[in-house]
Image: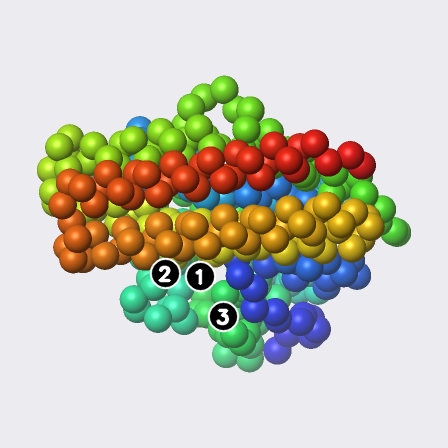
């Protein structure tokens, strides 16, 4: 049995949840929203040339690993991250770390995690979890942030999840803190996280990212029926919703979590304007939820005519306008 006393916590999103759990295990008390905000996790990107199962990719968060890396860097946490080509070596390295009493974050494929309900097991290769020991039967003890309790997984399934094929390949990636700061000053990490998030949402010159990316996707949605036909239009739109509402906390959920970060930052730094902006962002999250609800109706062919796609595009443009106003205000906050 494992002798690592690891505290499992259910969270809203896998990577920020793992960051929070691993840091707290090593003595740095940090909430999931604070890890998400300092790691500048909020984002938007539409990548029509990056296709998964033939469907263009859309993301509402920054790329996998960035939250952990940025939060670690800004808080002064030294981390080690390793990837592997060989399955046996990857499992040996995992065994070595947990034998040393170190809980380890892993990148994995949802499809090969048998403790997931069948309906949620699809080919998503950027799921994060923590392994913190082994049972007497040889199963790995798992703290998966989106599960309500800690669980176990057999070695074969875990190896498959760590080396799943497809984009992005996990390549057996594992990561863990190796040293923690004696104390943390929150102001600079919070400021750096906010500055980077504002840059992501407002200033990336490529029109596929941030608020410009939302407008780009909105116009494509409006042309889906005539460009790709009714069936593909439904598939493409369905993926936009799935990435928004099922992957991690999705588009609206990430907005709600960033709002919680702003409100917590307001208390830590005594800046009430951050709390007011957090309340505004919660309203933006509601706009995204309304978009997802209407898009779901279209996908189920309850309102799937050309006019409906036009209306959905207008709703996404409304989301982009609201986020542009919000992040321009946030960029002007003085620290």
Between the residue at mark 2 and the residue at mark 3, the CA separation in whole angstroms equals 15 Å
Q: Earlier in the sequence, mark 1 or mark 3?
A: 3
Residue at 47% across, 35% down? 321
Q: Is residue 175 found left or right of 205 in the rendered image?
A: right
Residue at 44% across, 28% down? 212
Quarter of the image with the N terminus is bottom right
Using the rendered image of the protein, determine whether residue 86 is visible from the camera's viewpoint.
no
**Residue tagged by mark 3?**
147
Quarter of the image with the C terminus is top right
Q: Which label number is shown at residue 200? A: none
Instruction: Describe the element under mark 3 as helix, strand or loop.
Output: loop
Q: Earlier in the sequence, mark 2 or mark 1?
A: 2
Q: Which label number is shown at residue 158? A: 1
Residue 14: image location, x then y, percent: 52, 57
Q: How busy is the neighbourhood of tag 3: few (under 14 within 10 Å), some, or many (20 plus)? A: some
Q: Quadrant of residue 78?
A: top right
Residue 276: image location, x then y, percent: 67, 50
Instruction: Describe the element under mark 1 as helix, strand or loop.
Output: helix
Nearest to viewer (mark 2 / mark 3):
3
Q: Quadrant of residue 109?
A: bottom left
Using the rendered image of the protein, determine whether residue 49 is visible from the camera's viewpoint.
yes
Residue at 64% across, 46% down? 277
Disc 2 to disc 1: CB gap under 8 Å? yes
Q: How busy is the neighbourhood of tag 2: few (under 14 within 10 Å), some, or many (20 plus)? A: many
Q: Is residue 21 found left or right of 290 in the rendered image?
A: right
**Residue tagged by mark 2?**
112
């Amino acid at each position: 049995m494992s002798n690592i006393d690891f505290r499992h916590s259910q969270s809203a999103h896998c990577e920020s949840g793992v960051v929070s759990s691993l840091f707290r295990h090593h003595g740095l008390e940090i909430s999931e929203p604070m890890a998400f905000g300092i790691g500048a996790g909020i984002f938007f990107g539409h990548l029509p040339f990056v296709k998964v199962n033939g469907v263009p990719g859309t993301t509402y968060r920054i790329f996998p690993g960035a939250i952990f890396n940025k939060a670690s860097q800004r808080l002064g946490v030294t981390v080690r991250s390793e990837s592997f080509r060989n399955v046996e070596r990857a499992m040996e390295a995992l065994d070595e770390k947990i034998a040393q009493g170190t809980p380890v974050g892993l990148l994995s494929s949802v499809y090969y995690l048998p403790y997931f309900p069948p309906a949620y097991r699809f080919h998503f290769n950027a799921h994060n979890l923590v392994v913190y020991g082994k049972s007497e039967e040889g199963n790995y003890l798992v703290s998966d942030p989106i599960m309500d309790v800690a669980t176990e997984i057999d070695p074969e399934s875990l190896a498959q999840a760590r080396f799943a094929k497809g984009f992005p390949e996990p390549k057996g990636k594992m990561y863990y803190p190796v040293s923690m700061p004696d104390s943390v000053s929150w102001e600079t990490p919070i400021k750096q996280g906010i500055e980077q998030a504002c840059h992501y949402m407002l200033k990336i010159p490529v029109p596929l990212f941030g608020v410009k990316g939302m407008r780009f996707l909105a116009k494509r949605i409006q042309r889906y029926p005539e460009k790709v036909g009714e069936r593909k239009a439904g598939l493409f739109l369905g993926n936009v919703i799935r990435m928004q509402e099922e992957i991690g906390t999705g588009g609206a959920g990430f907005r709600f979590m960033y709002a919680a970060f702003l409100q917590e930052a307001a208390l830590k730094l005594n800046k009430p304007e951050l709390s007011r902006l957090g309340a505004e962002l919660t309203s933006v999250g509601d706009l995204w939820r309304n978009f997802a609800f209407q898009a779901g109706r279209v996908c189920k062919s309850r309102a799937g005519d050309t006019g409906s796609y036009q209306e959905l595009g207008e709703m996404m443009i409304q989301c982009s306008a609201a986020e542009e106003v919000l992040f321009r205000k946030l960029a002007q906050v003085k620290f």
